[in-house]
Image (cartoon, rainbow, N blue to C red):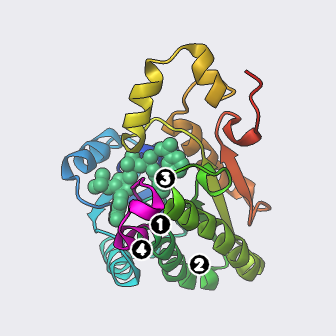
Amino acid sequence: MEKRLALITGGTSGIGLGTAKALAGKFDLALAYAENHEKAFDAAAQLNDCGSEVKIFVCKLDGYQSAKQLYDRVVADFGRQPEILVNSAGRIMDGFFLQTDFSIQEKLIQEHLVVSMAMCQLALKSMYGKRYGRIVNLSSISAIYAKRSQVSYAAAKAGIIGFTKALALEVAHRGITVNTVAPGLIRTPMTSGIINYLEKASPREISRHIPAGYIGEPEDVGSLIAFLCSDAARYITGSVITVDGGRSLGDTGT
Ligand SMILES: NC(=O)c1ccc[n+]([C@@H]2O[C@H](COP(=O)([O-])OP(=O)(O)OC[C@H]3O[C@@H](n4cnc5c(N)ncnc54)[C@H](OP(=O)(O)O)[C@@H]3O)[C@@H](O)[C@H]2O)c1
């Protein structure tokens, strides 16, 4: 029997790749990325013998038009529409609000929020007809737990929580779930700077920031997303699930 198709934006690196590995064997995989061909070929090679059809798609996502180009290419290449969508693409551009050019703020909102909304609308049309679909949008604990130098990132990620809930309400009756996953610090290329710093810190210092006492791995997020994409998660929709080793709980007491 033909496997369902999962489209993962940002699927060639970090959390997106962790998700692809967790979904591999159960779903065919369309992995989208922006520019790093080497990393994308390596990701595809890692999934080589997984028993799923895996294809990579380069597309710099910056708004509706680029999202549509990507979606149409995926549909043309696989000859069918995805039943699973994971929106993980995006990068971070930290900087103090007053010192950051407004074009950077707009870019972040476009890449994280507008692209995720566009991908949802594109994918939902066929999910609606099939009366089946699973969508997971990546937010961040930065949407909930304020951090200096992340004003527009927080705005984009908080927007993702808001639109995911409202959208979940509109499509729940068609067997479609839409959820948000909000990671804390996860070891990926995006976070290499802070991780290099924390790796030199004492266990006590790490525990001051992360109650679990260690940095999360992409698989910690990927396994949750895979569950949300499974039939077993049919009754979970509109949820925001943090995966952060307790980081956003509050005072660590140390
Ligand atoms: N890592 C964390 O601690 C953390 C915490 C909270 C939330 N998140 C969120 O989780 C998601 C994944 O982060 P990550 O840490 O896994 O990042 P990552 O390892 O840097 O991977 C990002 C992926 O997205 C792709 N990408 C970036 N910008 C894109 C664009 N404009 N168009 C198309 N593809 C694009 C990259 O492609 P290229 O490699 O070709 O550039 C790469 O495949 C992001 O939304 C991030 O905000 C991460």
In the image, residue 159 above or below residue 192: below
Q: Dots 4 and 3: beta carbons under 8 Å? A: no
Q: Mark 2: give few (<14), some (14-19) or many (20+) Cα within 10 Å.
A: many
The structure residue drawn at horizontal position 51% and vertical position 38%, both measured from the top left corner, is 186
146 sits left or right of 115 in the view:
right
Towards the viewer: 149 or 187: 149
Q: Do the residues labelled 2 and 3 touch (CB within 8 Å)?
A: no
Q: Which of marks 2 and 4 is in front?
A: 4
Going by the numbered disc 2, the residue's amino acid type is Met
Rendered residue at 69%/27% (across/down): 211
Q: Is mark 1 within 8 Å of ligand 1?
A: yes
Judge whether residue 105 is colored magenta. Answer: yes
Q: Disc 2 or disc 3, which is closer to the eye?
A: 3
Residue at the image point whose x is 46% and y is 35% from the top: 187
Q: Say which residue label 4 marks.
A: 106
- Give the residue at mark 1: 112
Give the mark nearest the N terminus, 1 or 2. Answer: 1
- Please give the range of residues in magenta: 90-108
Residue position for label 2: 127
The picture quadrant where one finds residue 50 is top left
Q: Nearer the viewer, mark 1 or mark 2?
A: 1
